[in-house]
Amino acid sequence: MSIDDLRDLLRVDDRDHSCSLEDVRDAIMEMSEYLLSYDGERFLLFHQGFVDYMHRKLMRVEGVIDAHKTFCRWLAAPTQRRSLYRLRHLPAHLQECALRLREAGRESEARRLIDDLMRLLTDFDFMEEKIGAGMTFDLIRDYQTALLFEPGQGEAPPLPEKRPVFQRLLGGLGLKREEIVVSPEAWHRFIDGESHIFVRYPQLFFQQAINQP
């Protein structure tokens, strides 16, 4: 996360009383000895053990839910559309928030977040950008974790014709990307099976997708 990212995150809930970039930078420098990594304008947050302690002893379930919701609102902003933090961490924030909501018995709220997560993991642009950023294996882990929420979901209903789904996208049916329904399981199998290619040649994602049955 960059200092600029943190400043924007702090402004999500209170834009009128937010810190300046200089204030945030000074605060980070003061606490840098407690960070796992601090390198110029970017830093890595506290050790996971400390995070777990904060969650259990200080924030409790409701505090953790509120924190994840804040991150989700921040990462949903247009300015974060292509941020590396969003690509790497938004699925995890959605997953963790949904899990905590279920633990708190708030199933309808959890269901909405799970739906948001499944939409994200079937969003062609998101997948293409994440693979392009060198996060192929992170994306595979996102699917593995997310599909624990939805076991046995099965395949999406097939569209007419037997041409590959993205050939239909480009061809005669005139469908837009967002109108093509492909299940998260199908995307997981495709990306996992082609991961050896995407790690070396991420620019081939669209081409490989076109050729999938």
Image (cartoon, rainbow, N blue to C red):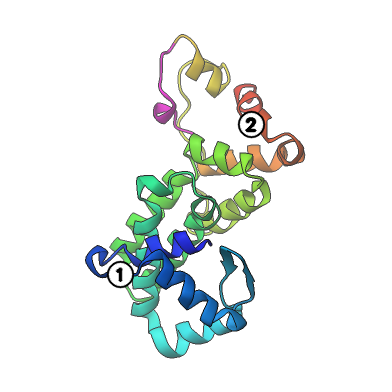
Image location of residue 92, percent across then percent down: 51, 61
* In this view, the mark in front (2 or 1): 2
Q: What's the residue at 42%, 49% (across, down)?
A: 80
Image location of residue 136, percent across then percent down: 66, 46
Number of dots carrying numbers? 2
Work out whether residue 50 or residue 153 is closer to the camera in this orientation and state it.
Answer: 50
Q: Which residues are magenta?
A: 173-182
In the displayed structure, 200 sits above or below 152; it is above
Marks 2 and 1: CB-CB under 8 Å? no
In the displayed structure, 93 sits above or below 61; it is above
In the displayed structure, 199 sits above or below 170; it is below
Quarter location, residue 203: top right
Q: What's the residue at 65%, 22% (across, down)?
A: 211
| Residue to which mark 2 is pinned | 205
The secondary element bearing badge 1 is classed as loop
Residue 176 magenta: yes
**In the rendered structure, which disc, 2 or 1, sits on the residue that comes first in sequence?**
1
Work out whether residue 179 or residue 26 is closer to the camera in this orientation and state it.
Answer: 26
Q: Amino acid at mark 1?
A: Arg
Q: Main secondary structure of the magenta part?
A: loop
Image location of residue 49, percent across then percent down: 60, 83
Mark 1, residues whose alpha carbon is within 10 Å: few (<14), some, or many (≥20)?
few
The secondary element bearing badge 2 is classed as helix
Residue 25 in the figure: left or right of residue 204:
left
| Residue to which mark 1 is pinned | 106
Work out whether residue 182 or residue 124 is closer to the camera in this orientation and state it.
Answer: 124
Residue 62 in the figure: left or right of residue 167:
left
